[in-house]
Image: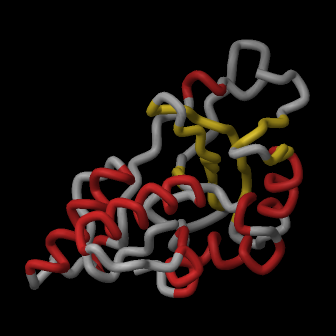
Amino acid sequence: GRIDHQVKIHGVRIEFGEIESLLLQHEAIKEVVVIAREDNPGDKRLVTYLVFKGDPINTSKIRAYLKQHLPERMIPAAFVVLEKIPLTANGKVDRRALPAPEYQGDEKAYVAPRTMTEKALSEIWQGVLKVDRVGIHDNFFDLGGTSVSLVFLTSKIQNLFAKPISIRGMYTSPT
């Protein structure tokens, strides 16, 4: 709710303009807006709205580009591709008209869970991330996962399987 477009997410202050200016340096991006959304109470996430100069490119490439320049806590949880950014009558960005993101994996690469263990893990991920479907190659962070939701995920996995799981391991192997 700050007028200067800063937000505190999980105890860290993030300035939207820093992310937006970096994205505008990418040759494929024409316009960008970054906001914080709280679609589920207590679950505030960064969302980026993009307008491409030409044909849209895969948002995983945009995510990889940001990871080269920003810390993990500043990487948006979701990217929404738009044809144009909605504006108010006086020409400012109409943040209320920006659509809610759909957190989903790569449709072309989707591989359904095959074993009972994979099915159980997929169901845990779906519950924590509040998504409809999780494939065995889907990336936790690409689906909207955050460091806080990672703590919930590892706790639920440990409770189900009665085996310790490393949070660090989830960062190195997020699928």
Nearest the viewer among 1 and 64 is 1
16, above or below 155, in the image: above
Quadrant into which the C terminus falls: bottom left
Hey, which quadrant is residue 106 in on the image?
bottom left
175, above or below 66, in the image: below
The number of callouts visible is 0
Hey, which quadrant is residue 21 in on the image?
bottom right
Q: Position of residue 84 (x, y in %)?
A: 60, 42
The residue at the far top in this view is 89
Left or right, residue 119 beside residue 34:
left
Q: Position of residue 143 (x, y in %)?
A: 43, 61
Left or right, residue 109 beside residue 68:
left
Nearest the viewer among 44 and 94 is 44
Q: Position of residue 152 (x, y in %)?
A: 44, 55
Q: Residue at x 87, y 22 (%)?
A: 3
Hey, which quadrant is residue 33 in on the image?
top right
Q: Residue at x 84, y 63 (%)?
A: 22
Nearest the viewer among 28 and 138 is 138
Q: Residue at x 49, y 54 (%)?
A: 149
Q: Position of residue 154 (x, y in %)?
A: 42, 66
Left or right, residue 169 beside residue 165:
right
